[in-house]
Amino acid sequence: MPPARFAEILRLLAAHDVEFVVVGMTAGILHGAPVTTVDLDVVHRRTRENVVRLLEVLAELDAVYRHDPRRLRPGESHLIGPGHQLLATTHGDLDCLGTIDQDRGYEDLLGQTVELSLAGGLAIRVLSLPALIEAKERAGRPKDLAALPVLKATLDEMQRRP
Amino acid sequence: MGVAPRDDTPAAPDIDENGVDRAQIRVMLALTPEERLRRIEEFVESALEIRELNASRALR
């Protein structure tokens, strides 16, 4: 398994002007939650232009479907749809999600995101911590519920900061 | 001249009512978003390394 280089994946996506929102536990980590994850989840904008830019990055990362031994590569028809593309890349596992949380796509999430900066002046959009907590509560799976105390405590600590 | 006694008592952990270590959160909040991500990457890398090293060992 290749080493996880999530920051580099985000940098590549931003440098190629891909429109996306970081969701899942990586969003929690970016906000400061001391949690861990082995994959990076992003919800991408499903326009043809954006999917073409995303495919350029995925080709650079040698992305293939990680649960298929045939090393199949994602195509435009996969990424334009609402489904989840679970990929293995040279920089770690990357999930490109058409929708999350009751069929919400990029445009639906945009109002609940914050912009965070990466070194070098690149900016990425990340699901806000309150929105992430709400999504985890709605999902209600054991793994989501298990993360809630840490996410909520992180939000509380953020709100206490001057 | 007297020497002030050294306080060797470690700082108490700051665990809240849900078992969450608040001090750990404050350490993370003091980092930039990219530094937070790098910290997790290092952890994942170490964990995977140990897993791969032990992958061929039979369970006892």
Image (spheres, helix red, strand yellow):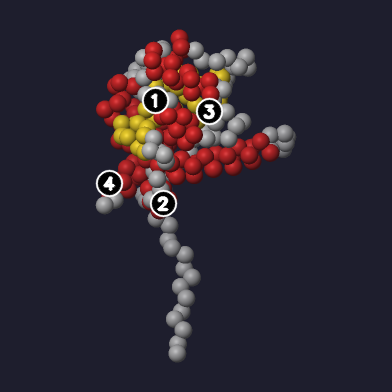
Which residue is the site of mark 2?
B27
Tag count in the figure? Answer: 4
Crowding at label 1, few (<14), some or many (≥20) Cα neighbours within 10 Å? some
Q: Amino acid at mark 4?
A: Gln
Cα distance in 3D space between marks 3 and 4: 32 Å
Q: Residue at x 35, y 31 (%)?
A: A125
Say which label, 3 or 4, has the lower sequence index: 3
Crowding at label 3, few (<14), some or many (≥20) Cα neighbours within 10 Å? many
Which residue is the site of mark 1?
A17
Say which label, 4 or 1, has the lower sequence index: 1
Labels 3, 1: front one: 1
- The picture places residue A68, in percent across and down from the top left corner, at 59, 16
Which residue is the site of mark 4?
A159
Q: Which mark is residue A93?
A: 3
A1 on left or right of B8: right
- The picture places residue A30, in percent across and down from the top left corner, at 40, 39
